[in-house]
Amino acid sequence: MSGSGLDFNRWDGPRSGVWARRGTIASMGLRQLLRGKLFKVLLGLGCLAGLVVAGAGFVFSQTLAEDGWLAELAAKGGPRAEAVMQGVSALLLLYPDLLVTGAYKVVFWAQAQLGLLLSLVAMTLLVPQLITRDRGSQALTIYLARPLTSQDYLLGKFGIIIGVLLMLWTGPLVIGWIVSMALVPDMVFFNYSLEAMGAALLFNLIAMVVVGSVAFGVSALAKTAAAARMGWIGLWIVMGIVAKTGALPSWVSHASFSYDLKLLSDEIFALGDTLKEAAEILPMLNANLASEVGQAANLVGTDELGGVITGLAILVGVSLTFLWGRIKPE
Amino acid sequence: MGQDQTGMSAVVEATNLSRFYGVVLGLNNVSFAIRPGITGIVGPNGAGKTTLFRLLTGQIKPSSGELKVLGGSPWNDLNVRAQIAYCPEDEAVPRGVRAPDWLTGLGMISGLSAKQAKAKAAASLERVNLPAVHWRKPVTALSKGMKQRVKLAQCLMHDPRLIILDEPMNGLDPMGRAEFSAVLRELAAEGASVLISSHILQDLEALCREFILLRWGRMPTAGNVAANAAKSELAVGSSDKTGEVPAKVAVRWPKETTIRCDDARKLAGFLMGRGLLRGCDIDEDGTMLLARWEDPAAFYDSFHGHLLASGVAIYEVNAPGSHLESAIEPPPLP
């Protein structure tokens, strides 16, 4: 049944709806997290990454634009410099998808790696707070005795995860991009950075679901805060290291969600394809450079997408099964 | 809501209610009705008290039978749960959160606006007499007694109609228990119904109008309760069609009280002079008085006043052999 429109027989004050009550759980958790020094440091690093995104976008657009600051500088540097600059501007007109989309993909990919790392560190702090402590101290019984279903409770807790990722990763990304777009001299940068932004948001969304589910599963399984943290670190760092050694069969490697997410980011941002295309299409200064770019493309590319998706899907499924079993025993 | 023989609406109605955890029995085919006021739930560990509370708060589903709380099912009716407050026996307080913040959050979860919840949190903490110096500390840093006050305060946030308290007196000193009891009486007077379990049976006897006895997941049969009640002057309610009844304590105060003091003879003379004693025994040291009351209520209703007026230094007041204690004693082996 719907939780809104509750019949408070003895309470005649204002009443809020079910989404407000779910939001309360999320905001309580986030406020608790924000009191910690380490989380404030993570937040500072996240904001710094956003500034770098904005700065990189600004410098890049000003460098390539026909009337940007580099063009002005080249004009002062004589006809040779001016000719080189005109060539670069012509490339922008001819290959905006490669230059703009490719450059923004690189920037967003780098921000995604940092954002994911910060989020995983933050989850180490957050995992016990999700469910473990509420179960251990029986505070869960107080929440669930109120007009709140298990789903409401879990949605509220998932709100904390969304909030963390928004603060450390998505927020800096989007704000950094918007700031850089506000300063671009040409709309071509906006139009051709959209694809890169779409890729970044897609990866962000997938990571949110995966990280959130695994964190929930660990938090639901662990009986103490220390066990929850150990479980999380084990799944994240230990399994990640094991997966990267390459000594084990690939299906074992895909049991590491951090390894899978790394491969998935390479696939979604498709930096390998962009580099290959650049090596083939763009007029390189010499053959060696073209060859090196091609080799770099091969390193970045991955052919394990099926294994990655299967591995992540199984991890999410198992985590949610554990979670549901613990929170809703009926 | 149904009405009982006295015409009062029942707050809780259970009919053949059972709850099993696999093969483990939690509650087994119990039927009872709880009327407005303060009702005690009594029974030894493992009697099924916590299972009953979890059923009443909608956290678990009955295996069979019917349970109605405030006219609805707590399992799937959020409107019912919006009118319930629950204070579990366990610590149940989150780490690193101050009492006003926690209460504000819980109030908002119950549907109050942020402003109202904040005001109500302050009012609730004042009502349970949590000293202001503790408001700025994390709840987990408070003493057990202070935590119990905070846990009671969270029950008051949304003006619930039914307050369920599982061992709320644990960790409270006698003064704290008296304050706690006063708050519960006020709540009952304001129209809330209180359901309380406690191992401190004397407090329960002084506080509750009615009791539900549980033992091994069942309510003792009329025969069992009557056997014990006969020893302890308990009045027993009439049997329903299932033959299982909630026991009702008609005698509110103990008939006998032991008082340790510096001059038992002087105290006995004083109480005799006020017409309170039916008889008494004094130990050889002259420091322990066993008082048998003419009218227990006459003494207990203003026992502070009587004892102060006696001018005797009092060290301990105790009621041997609580009626409730006798009533929940397991039946003798055949």
Image (spheres, rainbow, N blue to C red):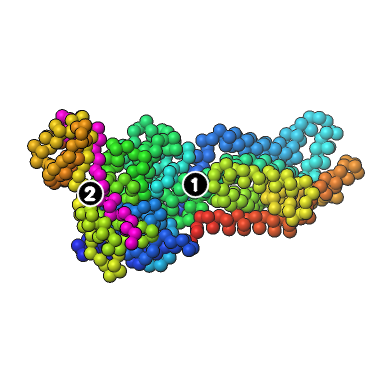
User: Would residue A319 appear left or right of B185 to someone viewing this image?
Assistant: right
Q: Mark 2 lies on which chain?
A: B
User: Against B205, is B75 above or below?
Assistant: below
The structure residue drawn at horizontal position 73% and vertical position 53%, both measured from the top left corner, is: A252
User: Against A99, is B22 above or below?
Assistant: below
Depth-wise, is mark 2 or mark 1 nearer the camera? Answer: 1
Residue A328, label in figure: none
Q: How crowded is mark 2: few (under 14 residues within 10 Å), some or many (20 or more)?
A: few
User: Would residue A113 appear left or right of A31 to someone viewing this image?
Assistant: right
Three-letter code for the amino acid on which mark 1 is drawn: Gly
Closer to the camera in the image, A292 or A208: A208
Residue B102 visible here? yes
The structure residue drawn at horizontal position 74% and vertical position 51%, both measured from the top left corner, is: A253
Q: What is the quadrant of the C terminus of chain B in the image?
A: bottom left
Three-letter code for the amino acid on which mark 2 is drawn: Ala
Q: What is the quadrant of the N terminus of chain B in the image?
A: bottom left
Q: Which region shows up in magenta?
A: B307-334
What is the x, y in percent for residue A186? Answer: 69, 43
Q: Helix, strand, or loop for circle 2?
A: helix
The structure residue drawn at horizontal position 70% and vertical position 47%, both measured from the top left corner, is: A239
Q: Name the residue under label 1.
A: A136
Q: Helix, strand, or loop for circle 1?
A: helix
What is the x, y in percent for residue A107? Answer: 71, 42
Residue B189, label in figure: 2
